[in-house]
Image (tube, rainbow, N blue to C red):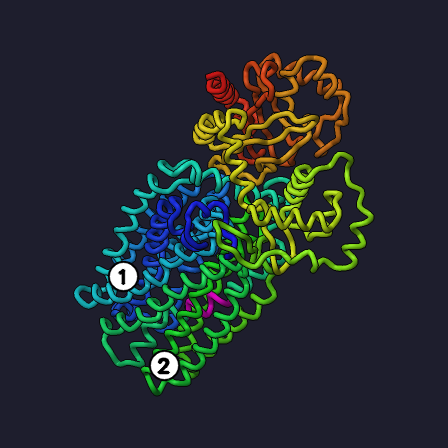
Amino acid sequence: MTATSPATETAPSGSGAGFWRSARARYLMPVAFVTYSLAYLDKSNYAIASAGGMADDLRLSAGTDSLVAASFFLGYFFFQIPGTIYAEQRSARRLVAWSTVAWGLLAVTQGLLSSPAQLIAVRFALGVVEGAVLPSMVMLLGRWFTRGERGRANTLLILGNPITVMWLSAVSGWLVSVADWRAMFIAEGVPSVLWGLCCLRLVKDSPEQANGLPEPELALLRADLAVERAAAPAVAGTLRRQYTRVLCSRPVLLMAAQYFFWSFGMYGFVFWLPAIIKKGSGEGIGATGLLTAIPYACAAAVMLLNSRLSDRSGRRRAAVWPWLACGGLALLASYAAAGDFPVALALLVVAGVCLYAPYGPYFALVSALAPPGIAGAAVALVNSFGALGSFAGTYLVGWVRGTPLGDAGAFALMAACTLLAAALTLAAPSARRPSGRTRYLDHGRSGPGPPHPGDVSGTERRKAHTVTTPSGDDMLGRGLRLLTVLAEHPAGLGVSAAARAARLPVSSAHRLLGRLVEERFAVYDEDTRRYALGSRVLELSRGFQRSPSGYSAAAEPMRRLAARTGLPVIAGVLDGTEVLLVLSVQGTQHLQLRSAEGTRNPWHATSLGKALAAALPEADRERLLSGPLPAVTPRTVTDPDRLRAELAQVRDRGWAEVEEENEIGVRSIAAALPGAPDSARPLAVSLAATVILTDAGQLRALAPELRDCVTEIAARVSA
């Protein structure tokens, strides 16, 4: 069977069932679906209003009508990146909720206006307030779901697009037929205002803030996301510099260009489909609305199938470009069959299906182009260029239809842009999961496994004779060394590389790896011929965290501190001359930190390390000060006398602080548990913040709350 994300393996069925049965999907996805559905409703019903009499009532020419429709996307462009950065570093909940209220009020206002200039201004403002909603929601889903689930999560979010258009076409057409276009705008804007107020209570910035989610599922999710953060490429520098590097990177700019052309073809299709069908069928607005709904009904089903296949295989590009290529060809063919309306309509259905099917995998691909914590900006930039493409598509397609080129030119333009988007997708970097098409034995079901020892090459067998194994080695020690090696290489290792790193003969390493695969401690990727850690390791981690020595007593106080302050809360212990991070809880400011559980940092560069060192007996403290003190950043204190003075200050006031000593752009404070010197494994807890969003005085003011947290943890440990 195909390996699933460990966070979904609580479900006993196949790889797809875990996502749909997870408490996270049941909690967040209905909220996300309704929110995006209302957003799409209020930006897309303009086409129905235009075809339903607004253009005649306001005496809009074809060019002016297109400009009014397209002004939304011009406004949509401007707020994308700053709005998403606010959501990513502050609160997605507040941004989504108040944006929903604002666009509902603006949607109602459209029904009260009487001139093209007023409509252009309101449509532009509507685009501004809606701008950051989609990238913020995609970013939010990245906190709630693992990489192997995001294709389906994004699809269910964006499914609000075709499903909304489907009933929008029918309901909006009915409202226009029984009343007028003004009543349609008002009736469809009010629900957004009410829903936005509901979002303040329903939307949560992270799963930990939601009530009722099972702790085992949250523990597995945290472990999965920690692995992703550890495997993500590091982006050095301040937060501003990190965002700048991501936004200027070649892969992100390439996908931005791709989405420009895709959106050009897509929104030209969406906005002018009702008018094209009305002209071809000769039916009234009500029947036109029903016919327009057909492509979207078919697209919804195919979107779900494509996203599931993409999540299972990890192949994102292959779930995008073939659909776009077929969509462009179907657009051309639909115009060629214009004389036979049933055939033309069938081809328009194919075009609609192909244009919509790739959305979920596409945004999963874009999200993987940047590290967690700043990936939202990449989505925002790509979506911004999509807005420009939408502006160009709605305006130019409408304008071309009013020229002698007519519908032939419009269809050719949409098809050419869609085909170009397909070609650009092929040039995008592949973002397959490290596990790829991993196969392993699971719950009694077997699949293709690693190669037989006889498959090991002669070169590898000869290398085995040159390996020197540690003295006193036994089978258990060898297996544990292999697991440690795999943990140090998240992307996986081939059998020879794993054997060298573990100082084992290739034949021994191969037998042990095969056994680890059978027991689910490791997985084997048939495509890359690499081994990586398996889901059983996460089960051990969860068992450790729940044990008396696993710091489970710290989890709840840390979650409450993160909720109160909005900052990440991290717990760590001293392990030799390093601080080992054992537990982390994200706040509303999701920072790109080296804070994954299992991460090690030099003790003298972290507030955790200084808090723990200050609590040690003098002899142990001096041993740390006499050891290596490397500079991690230009601001790391490496002078033993300065550190000795700092530790004395920490003992006096009860907490430590660092200023960009371990990571540029990040400051933190930490406090050790009272009575730490008497415990076998002293624990400290820290609060971290960016220097841009939180100044030193604001962070220091939180020291009393931090001390209260560690005091509560100490009481829980004693109990």
Place of residue 441 in the rendered image (x, y in percent of width and height, measured from the top left): 53, 52
> Looking at this rendering, what residue extends furthest in the bottom direction?
339
Question: Which of the 4 image quarters holds residue 454?
Answer: bottom right
Residue at screen point 55% across, 15% down: 674
Q: Is there a contact, CB below 8 Å, between mark 2 and mark 1?
A: no
Q: Residue 114's mark?
A: 1
Residue pointed to by mark 2: 344
SS type, badge 1: loop
Q: Is residue 333 left or right of residue 450?
A: left
Mark nearer the viewer, 2 or 1: 2
Please tell me whether the stretch drawn in magenta is mainly helix, strand or loop: helix
* Viewer-proximal residue among 495 and 708: 495
Q: Residue 6's mark?
A: none
Give the magenta range.
Answer: 260-268
Residue at screen point 28% across, 54% down: 189
**Earlier residue among tags 2 and 1:** 1
Q: Is residue 688 left or right of residue 351?
A: right
Question: Which of the 4 image quarters holds residue 330?
Answer: bottom left
Query: Is 263 within the magenta?
Result: yes
Place of residue 86 in the rendered image (x, y in percent of width and height, measured from the top left): 48, 42
Q: Is residue 400 above or below residue 100?
A: below
Residue at screen point 65% across, 36% down: 664
Q: Is residue 515 left or right of residue 34?
A: right
Q: Is residue 343 above or below residue 357?
A: below
Query: Is 520 within the magenta?
Result: no
